[in-house]
């Protein structure tokens, strides 16, 4: 019999129960016992769900209150002194590391004021993990035994699970050294860490765990020799221990081929690979499976929401069975299902045709089970038939295929992705129109999204206010933002984006080819969940999406107002993409739709248009090579297709944040002005890369994630430092990103100080 396995299940609960409970706990409205109870119920119902679906290998320890990597930092006592010194209860220390903690002293408690640990993107996903942060004073020891507790909790329900832990080398390699220990290489801590892993694993074994899953997702990266050596060392060490459960070594999100020699011969029971993302690795990967090892075939997509193709998957798994025999093959999800929404059954208003093409985490359980049964020779013909029907229907669906869009993409030529003249000529035409001072000041687009805005949006969505009333409300918000910017004397204004719920969803809702869920939440970090829109078909723009608001804003001021759009790559990356068409094609379709919008804005008299691409970095393939260099070309091209339909006189802006973007990638966009998140980077080397780049740049001068107000002097010092490396003539003054999560008061103060600093420099030059 071929077994079925799941690498991890979403832990947010079918109706975001975990978010409500954790946020309630942070606000003091939910007790720790109530919080624990919610968590326990989620775990129990996840296990029961998987059991009922017939999954053979069910994960435990995939639950987390905040992040599974942070769980390990707590478990192994990787807690910087600035947190441990407060001697908070363990769960509070944990949350303090995840999200920071600021608490005034009370009669019984001391003041606490500590910022969060660094949070970074989990590989190329939109999940963020909390970075393990090591220092010379890190003392490894076990803090509790979460994996064991959760294993026992399942066991008590009569459910045998396979606990999952991030493996030791990924844990160290994905971490960093703390500010006080910059000379420390986290990998050098492996010898101290391994005995703790062995201890927790043998405790699991004593508790009855026969198997564990150790994730080493870093195996899909380009790894230096020392990391590969660490992998060898760690798993050889485990191999020498006597009382450990059997280990499944799991990789996902890419191919392991360049690291295959390291994987070969490791003393583990099973090897798991992601054949959804990298099917091409199959032929070579099988050579790494030893005579007594099992192959776990990751074939049900843990990253996307499309129904599995049973015929194709079964054929793939059968290839493995013909080599290893049924007993040595496991049918599995490609990665944890954490990255997919919980249950399609909760979608009440989704088009029924589309619903038939989707599969969320709960449905994916049936998928692994059905494939496993099928390849084991059980009769699942009814399931196969309805699956084949759905797959066939999708291929010819009129919702999905739009010949006009396909033809338009086919006719894209290089002229479409090139501005009419090079930057210098454009600048010469633009300067007399805009007449901007040196150090022009602007913002990135959004202004505080107040409660009032959310209430009115909800009313409009529910139909309790009319479209006219809502428009009047939005216009009054725009007017407020315009007047505010005039008052504090910013140079280039924005309309403030009050009409936008989310920078991708807002446009997705207006494009043909997109679908939306009502409950398709996916954890992004901590208690922040997102509901990615789904690209279901060929994309096009039935009508203008943002012109009305921009035109209104421009009509009430003499200063220039930037039109504001979300770029093609960001729309693509923050959606669930199609799996039947390559991402480049989807990006081009988005680019063409946005090109029409950019052109319409220009025709309506908007002279500066910003197209944001904050997600362009996260789309970068994980490994160096052809796929990555191709991406760099087509991602930039998509942006240029969207923005090159305008005359030289129209000034194109773009914006980047969230990550270190390769300067060459920015330059390839040829935007007239780009604003880059910079306040936390402070890296002169990075600025220097732009010294000879003619187009203009705004380096973000303050962190919009924090309510802190920088003083005028602080801005001056920052700008002075930048000007040591970067020419004043090309320098714009702006914040790091949009201000939508900020309050009005701090926004007013910060921007006022920023403008004052710009004026100070104008007098110097
Ligand atoms: N224009 C958007 C805003 O200001 C940009 C957001 C982003 O880069 N994440 O909100
Ligand atoms: Zn941003």
Image (spheres, rainbow, N blue to C red):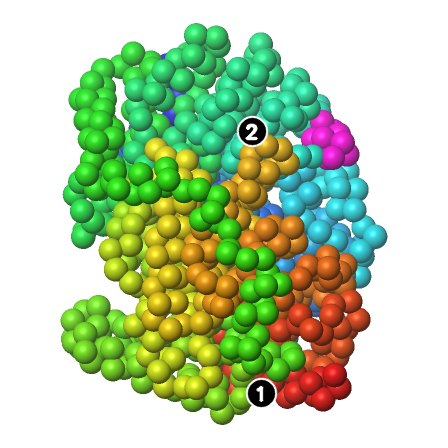
Q: Taking 39 as reference, is 24 above or below it? A: below
Circle 2 packing at 10 Å, graded few (<14), some (14-19), many (20+), is many
Circle 1 sits in a helix, a strand or a loop, which is it?
Answer: helix
Sequence-wise, the earlier of marks 1 and 2 is: 2
Q: CA distance from mark 1 to mark 2?
A: 50 Å
> In this picture, which residue range is highlighted in magenta?
224-233
Q: Estimate the x, y position of residue 354 in percent, counting from the top left.
A: 22, 42
| The label number, if any, that marks residue 752 in the structure image | 1
| The label number, if any, that marks residue 255 in the structure image | 2
Is the residue under label 2 in contact with that under label 1 (CB below 8 Å)? no
Circle 1 packing at 10 Å, graded few (<14), some (14-19), many (20+), is some
Please identify the quadrant where the N terminus is shown.
Answer: top left
Circle 2 sits in a helix, a strand or a loop, which is it?
Answer: loop
Is the residue marked 1 within 8 Å of ligand 1, measured from its CB? no
Residue 273 or residue 372, whichever sits in front: 273
Compared across the picture, whether 442 is left or right of 402 comes to right
Q: Nearer the viewer, mark 1 or mark 2?
A: 1
Q: Taking 15 as reference, is 549 above or below it? A: below
Compared across the picture, whether 671 is left or right of 505 comes to right
Residue 8 or residue 247, whichever sits in front: 8
Compared across the picture, whether 620 is left or right of 693 comes to left
Seen at 35% across and 82% down, the residue is 555
Please identify the quadrant where the C terminus is shown.
Answer: bottom right
Q: Hey, which quadrant is residue 398 in on the image?
A: top left
Seen at 58% across and 68% down, the residue is 427
């Amino acid at each position: 019999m071929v077994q079925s396995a799941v690498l991890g299940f979403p832990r947010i609960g079918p109706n975001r129960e975990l978010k409500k409970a954790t946020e309630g706990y942070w606000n003091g409205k939910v007790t720790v016992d109530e919080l624990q109870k919610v968590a326990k119920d989620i775990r129990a119902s996840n296990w029961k769900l998987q059991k009922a679906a017939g999954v053979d290998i069910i994960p435990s320890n995939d639950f987390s209150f905040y992040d599974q990597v942070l769980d390990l930092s707590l478990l192994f006592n990787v807690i910087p002194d600035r947190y441990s010194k407060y001697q908070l209860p363990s769960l509070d220390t944990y949350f303090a590391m995840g999200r920071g903690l600021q608490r005034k002293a009370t009669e019984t408690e001391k003041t606490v004021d500590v910022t969060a640990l660094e949070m970074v993107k989990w590989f190329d996903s939109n999940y963020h993990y909390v970075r393990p942060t090591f220092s010379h004073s890190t003392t490894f020891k076990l803090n509790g035994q979460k994996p064991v507790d959760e294993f026992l909790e399942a066991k008590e329900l009569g459910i045998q699970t396979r606990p999952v832990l991030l493996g030791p080398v990924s844990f160290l390699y994905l971490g960093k050294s703390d500010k006080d220990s910059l000379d420390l290489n986290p990998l050098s801590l492996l010898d101290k860490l391994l005995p703790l892993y062995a201890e927790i694993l043998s405790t699991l074994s004593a508790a009855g765990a026969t198997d564990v899953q150790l994730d080493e997702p870093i195996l899909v990266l380009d790894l230096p020799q020392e990391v590969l050596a660490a992998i060898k060392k760690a798993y050889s060490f485990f191999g020498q221990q006597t009382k450990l459960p059997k280990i499944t070594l799991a990789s996902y999100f890419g191919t392991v081929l360049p690291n295959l020699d390291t994987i070969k011969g490791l003393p583990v029971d099973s090897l798991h690979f992601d054949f959804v993302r990298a099917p091409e690795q199959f032929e070579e990967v099988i050579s790494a499976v030893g005579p007594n090892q099992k192959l776990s075939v990751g074939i049900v997509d843990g990253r996307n929401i499309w129904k599995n193709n049973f015929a194709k998957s079964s054929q793939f798994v059968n290839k493995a069975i013909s080599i290893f025999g049924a007993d040595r093959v496991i049918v599995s999800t490609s990665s944890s299902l954490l990255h997919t929404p919980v249950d399609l059954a909760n979608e009440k208003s989704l088009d029924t045709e589309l619903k038939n093409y989707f599969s969320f985490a709960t449905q994916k359980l049936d998928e692994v089970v059905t494939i496993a049964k099928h390849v084991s020779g059980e009769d699942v013909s009814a399931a196969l038939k309805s699956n084949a029907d759905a797959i066939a229907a999708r291929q010819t669906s009129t919702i999905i295929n739009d010949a006009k869009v396909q033809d338009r993409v086919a006719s894209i030529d290089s002229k479409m992705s090139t501005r009419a003249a090079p930057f210098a000529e454009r600048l010469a035409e633009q300067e007399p129109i805009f007449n901007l001072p040196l150090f022009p000041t602007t913002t990135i687009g959004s202004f505080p999204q107040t409660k009032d805005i959310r209430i009115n949006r909800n009313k409009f969505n529910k139909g309790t206010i009319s479209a006219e009333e809502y428009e009047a409300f939005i216009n009054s918000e725009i007017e407020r933002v315009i007047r505010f910017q005039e008052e504090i004397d910013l140079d280039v204004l924005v309309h403030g984006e009050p009409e936008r719920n989310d920078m991708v969803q807002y446009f997705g809702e207006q494009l043909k080819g997109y679908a939306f869920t009502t409950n398709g939440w996916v954890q992004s970090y901590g208690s922040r969940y997102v509901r990615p829109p789904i690209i279901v078909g060929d994309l096009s723009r039935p009508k203008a999406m943002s012109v009305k608001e921009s035109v209104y804003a421009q009509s009430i001021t003499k200063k220039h107002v930037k039109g504001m759009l979300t770029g093609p790559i960001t729309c693509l990356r923050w959606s669930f993409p199609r799996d039947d068409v390559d991402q480049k094609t989807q990006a081009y379709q988005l680019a063409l739709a946005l090109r029409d919008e950019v052109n319409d804005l220009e025709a309506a008299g908007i002279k500066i248009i910003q197209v944001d691409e904050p997600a362009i970095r996260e789309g970068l393939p994980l490994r160096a090579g052809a796929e990555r260099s191709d991406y760099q070309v087509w991602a930039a091209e998509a942006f240029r297709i969207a923005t090159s339909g305008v005359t030289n006189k129209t000034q194109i802006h773009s914006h980047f944040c969230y990550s270190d973007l390769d300067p060459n990638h920015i330059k390839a966009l040829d935007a007239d002005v780009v604003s880059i998140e910079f306040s936390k980077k402070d890296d002169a080397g990075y600025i220097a890369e732009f010294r000879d780049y003619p187009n203009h740049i705004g380096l973000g001068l303050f962190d919009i994630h924090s309510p802190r107000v920088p003083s005028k002097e602080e801005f001056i010092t920052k700008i002075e430092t930048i000007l040591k490396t970067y020419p004043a003539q090309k320098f714009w003054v702006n914040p790091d990103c949009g201000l939508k999560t900020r309050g009005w008061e701090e926004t007013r103060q910060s921007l006022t100080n920023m403008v004052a600093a710009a004026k100070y420099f104008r007098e110097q030059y």
